[in-house]
Image: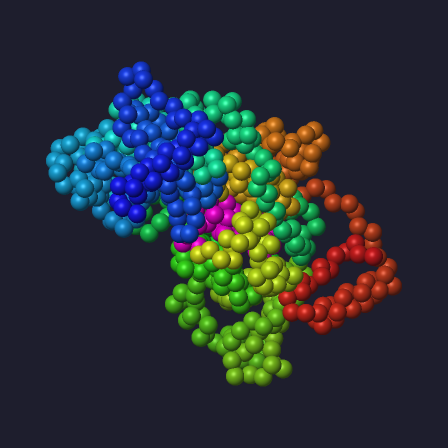
Amino acid sequence: MDSDKADSTAEAVHKFYVAEDERKFGAPIKEDDGEVEIVNATFSLGYGGMLLLSHTNLRLLKGHRYGLCGRNGAGKSTLMRSIANGKLEGFPPQDEVRTCFVEHNQGEDADLSILEYTAKDPDLKAEGMERIVSVLEEVGFTSGPEGRQSQKVGSLSGGWKMKLALARAMLMRADVFLLDEPTNHLDVANVKWLQEYLKTHTEITSLIVSHDSGFLDEVCTDIYHYEQKKLVCYKGNLADFVRQKPEGKSYYTLSASQVQFKFPPPGILTGVKSNTRSILRMTDCTFTYPGGTKPSLQDVTCSLSLSSRVAIIGANGAGKSTLIKLLTGETIPQTGKVEKHPNLRIGYIKQHALEHVEMHLEKTPNQYLQWRYANGDDREVLMKATRVLTDEDKAQMEKMIDLGDGSGGRRLEALIGRQKYKKSFQYEVKWVGLLPKYNTMISRETLLAQGFSKLIQEFDDHEASREGLGFRQLEPKVISKHFEDVGLDPEIANHNEISGLSGGQKVKVVLAGAMWNNPHLLVLDEPTNFLDRDSLGGLAVAIRDYKGGVIMISHNEEFVGALCPEQWHVADGRLTSKGHLAVSMDRFEDSRPGSSMASSVVSSVAASTVGSPSASAPASDAEGDMKFRARKKKKLTKKELKEREVRRRLRHINWLSSPKGTPHPPDTDDEA
């Protein structure tokens, strides 16, 4: 076939498919009222071996703000990256339409001042220092030796990092802003500032990916929606889009109709018979970051139980994430103490959730979970500050210990067993150079007084993990089902590398990792980031129905209002409780009077104190205030006591002969 005939055939095929698209989806809407068109691109887009968009049209008008909506994995971020990298077919090059990907990623130059960081940017070399200072001032960075421009980049909170990224885009004289989840990590005040900023700069066109319905309602002039591998444009904001497309109502309700999450039950905590009993407590804790002049948190006291539903509220940089790190053992307070139930298992998702999987991008989600729990322990727990041995801890292990029992000084080798002792535990200690018959049972309090807190923590974490993983089989089939329970397709979990997943899919991998060992307490730092509306609804319903405790940081008022009747406010390093609020049950699509959520709210409100000076439980008697009045116990006869002891001994013997990993059955006073 000659070239002319080939061209005519290709043109005929092209016209045929354009006509078919217009017949199915309608012709692209064009305005003839003086609007300036800056982009009109027809393209197809793929990622790996997957076709994301097929022969679709993207048309951008000057000054318009477009919301890009679609499910996780549809290709929203891929489209933005392709535009930013100049790899989208038909999109004008940078010398015609200057585009800028607005992202707060300044980690590599954390030690530079804000002014130095901006002036160093190779894309801004043509700009004079005077203009750089002026633009930085426009977004709030004051000049001068004492101004914000002289602060270190690494000290900026999420809100200020976004402002710095916007200043860079303005200095590049960008025609198009590409914003991927711009409200992530922003508090309410900074979200409001960003809304006003985008609306007042009418010469700039914005393409926005966000799952914040309030932000899209306030900012967007148009919505592009992913439909059957096409981009379909709707005039108006998100509310107008939902009116035209009723199936888009999930943007306004927390529904699990499309994506369902199912969290495993938390399991039994020995000695905890009431959901209102304290299982994690901080008392008078103060923490200052190295080099800091002011404490990030000061004299903080708080308490959590299995019935807790707590939201931590505060401005960017107030110390919310620091509070979470102290509670989970990521960091250790300089003063005060953090106490937890010895068998407590915590499922923790960091503020920058993708950090959990950054070192495992070449693995599939299935392989990542197998790596994390391969040895019967959660490997992430081993990296916490409460587990890492310092030089002082290692020196303590070398010291001779004299218990005053006439045996003289001995050196501790390891803890190899544990059993209940009064209201605490005692541990079986193996001594260096001595046979097992010389092992000694030593109380928890004695070991703590001798300085072996991290050794106790290591043994307690191992026992807690052993109980949590007792009924878990680390097999591909079981793992696939677990990923399905958090909304991730098993095919993706088994065959796709983590590096190829979208942000929302990576968050689901992190969530699956945190929930694998059946935690009693779920700690979520900005859990809504990267999740689409369907996944957000599935997560909200799962948290609502979860039987363990939940504490979260989130700037998503809709999410917090639907789930958390208790709010802790952090400001200037101090923690205060706002008391208890009525949750908005009508935000759930499946809510109804008398539903399980209503009862859980009642129990949560009853479980906590109201308006305490610093947190949900006062320091003086944090546990006493969280208990309901216990029923009076019947005094047992000698015969009944003996029979109970026999039952417990038989139960313990059966447990010793059970498969490895089986949880120890609890010994309670009200057993038959």
Q: 31 or 595, which lies in front?
A: 31
Question: Is residue 280 in view from this perspective?
Answer: no
Q: Is residue 196 left or right of residue 496?
A: left
Q: Residue at x 17, y 40 (%)?
A: 124
**243 in relation to 322, above or below:** above
**Is residue 243 found left or right of 42 in the rendered image?**
right
Q: Using the image as rendered, state which of residue 167 and residue 9 is in the foreground.
A: 9
Query: Which residue sits at x=43%, y=32%?
Result: 21
**Residue 84 position within the rendered picture, expressed as x and y whole percent measured from the top left:** 29, 41
Where does the magenta region start and end?
498-526
Along the viewing direction, whichever of 8 and 598 lies nearer the viewer: 8
Q: Please report the residue visible at 56 percent of the width from the left and 34 percent of the height from the top.
A: 254
x%, y% of residue 280?
Answer: 56, 50
Of 575 and 66, which appears nearest the observer?
66
Q: How is the image coloured?
A: rainbow
Q: Quadrant of residue 307?
A: top right
Q: Quadrant of the C terminus?
A: bottom right
Say whether residue 102 is magenta: no
| Residue 456 x %, y % | 54, 64
Q: Is residue 267 above or below residue 179?
A: below
